[in-house]
Amino acid sequence: MWKKILVGLIVGFISGMFASGGGLLLIPAYIHFFDSSEKEARATAIFCILPMVLVTAIFYGTGNYINWKTGMLCSIGGIIGSFIGSKLLAILKGKYLKLIFILFLIYSGIKIVFF
């Protein structure tokens, strides 16, 4: 139990600092520390991210850091994309999810370092 709380604490801290949502950290943690399957790790991460994101959003909102128009418009696409992504999660095999996730991490790392 304490190990899970510690993982949540670390991910919440990093998520709050970098506004990352935490999924990139939670998914590998669930797989490696708690022996979760790919699908279970992703689904559990989404469940755990919601309260962390709400706390961070309240902080940023009360601090007047949010561009509300951009955020609302992007949320429309995000809702549609989340629906499609969750449907694909139920269909895709674990090895394909790993490949997609790895490619996404590589792409994100390159963008952060070079752009």
Image (spheres, rainbow, N blue to C red):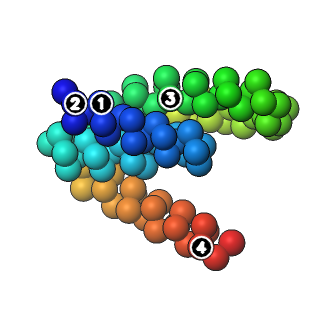
- In this rendering, is residue 1 above or below 74? above
Give the image quarter of residue 65. Answer: top right
Q: Is residue 81 rendered to the left or right of residue 94?
A: right
**Which of the image's four quarters has the N terminus?**
top left
- Nearer to us of marks 2 and 3 is 2
Residue receiving disc 1: 5
Residue receiving disc 2: 2
Q: Amino acid at mark 2?
A: Trp
Marks 4 and 1, Cα distance to the nearest angstrom? 31 Å
Near-viewer residue (97 or 56): 56
Residue receiving disc 4: 113
Chain-order first, disc 2 or disc 4: 2
Marks 2 and 4, Cα distance to the nearest angstrom? 34 Å
- Nearer to us of marks 1 and 3 is 1
Residue receiving disc 3: 52
> Pointers 1 and 2 in contact (CB under 8 A)?
yes
In the rendered image, residue 17, in percent from the top left (x then y), is placed at: 58, 45
